[in-house]
Image (cartoon, grey):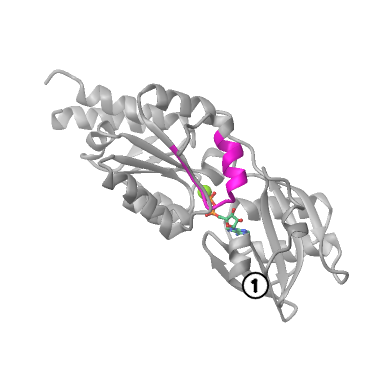
Amino acid sequence: ATPTAILVGSAIGAERGILIKGGDILERVHQLHTVVFDKTGTLTTASPQVTTCVSLSHGFSEDRILQLAAAVEQGTHHPIATAICRALEGRNLPIIDAEGFVTQTGLGAAAMVDGERVWVGSAEGLSGCGVILSESVLSIIPPGETVVYVTVGDELVGVIGICDRLKSDAKMTVERLQKMGLNVVLLTGDRFSVAEAIASELQLSEGSVLAEVRPEDKAKAIAAYQQQGHRVAMVGDGINDAPALAQADVAIALGTGTDVAIETADIVLMGDALGDVVESIRLSQQTFNKIR
Ligand code: ADP
Ligand code: MG
């Protein structure tokens, strides 16, 4: 394609809210084999909902568990934080103060509340704290839901279940990409059972689901595809996706994503529509298939 064709392609993209950050990007899009999607906030809505809250300690009511979790989540920008803070509003519970916020990307978060360390996060993050989960605790939250454990000091005090829905255009986007001959992959830090539920809804092919993957290992997963000779696009929204976005041949961030994701991206979808991933590929085809 001529430099003019590339400029025209980028301008058409910009008009649709597809921000292409450089002249060589459309060419790389044209050569893609694999499109990897993050789950939370990318394929699923950025506003999941709390479905369950169970206290595991006599000293803590369900409401108190939610309040403590929300106090910690104030310090994060994760979709889980949105869900927990919204649940608090739904129960008319005030948000309590916290300080000393620490975010463990892809694992959880912690803060000090009333002089005690409160931590929220995944089973993996919990095992890092030395807590071993019993079968009865593991089975509280149904397989299709994200689990958030809450600890105060060294004690596991509660568990929260969170339900995430696919975005309305997720299924069609995946279908269209597959019809274009692209390999579509789901890459998430969430538990296997949640990833599998999403993958079956999207009818992803076997072997295209990677779950319980830490942020740094998300980048390794992209590299593994590249080592097989694949050109890979990564679509993501979170801080946890930044290493994978940096590793991918084409990094696509949602406009609603975190600053780090947007800065790392080659393409930003301002309208937040997953269908724009397909449009970006169409645009590259139009730009590069023209007779020169
Ligand atoms: P995804 O790859 O689906 O975007 P993340 O890498 O952000 O997911 O997170 C992986 C898992 O770590 C989540 O499913 C959750 O269990 C836990 N986690 C991450 N951030 C938080 C948080 N702010 N609060 C509670 N749990 C979290
Ligand atoms: Mg995400």
Looking at the image, residue 218 sits to the left or right of residue 121; the answer is left
Q: In which quarter of the view is residue 184 placed?
A: top left
Is residue 243 rendered to the left or right of residue 39?
Answer: left
Three-letter amino acid code of the residue under disc 1: Ala
Q: Residue furthest front?
A: 135
Q: Is residue 166 magenta?
A: no
Which span is picked out in magenta?
A: 185-199
Q: Residue furthest bottom?
A: 115
Residue beneath label 1, please? Answer: 111
Q: Is residue 263 visible?
A: no
Q: Residue at x 14, y 18 (%)?
A: 291
* Res. 285 visible in picture: yes
Q: Residue at x 69, y 62 (%)?
A: 149
Determine the secondary structure under disc 1: strand
Q: Pick the quarter of the image with the N terminus.
A: top left
Q: Position of residue 5 (x, y in %)?
A: 19, 27
Q: Is residue 209 above or below residue 139?
A: above
User: Where residue 276 appears, x then y in whole percent?
Assistant: 42, 30
**Residue 250 drawn at (x, y percent):** 31, 42
Does residue 292 lie above or below 4 as drawn?
A: above
Ligand 1's quadrant: bottom right
Quadrant of the snapshot with the C terminus: top left
Give the residue drawn at x 74%, y 55%.
160
Q: Dot 1, how many residues are within 10 Å of its Cα: few (below 14), some (14-19), or many (20+)?
A: many
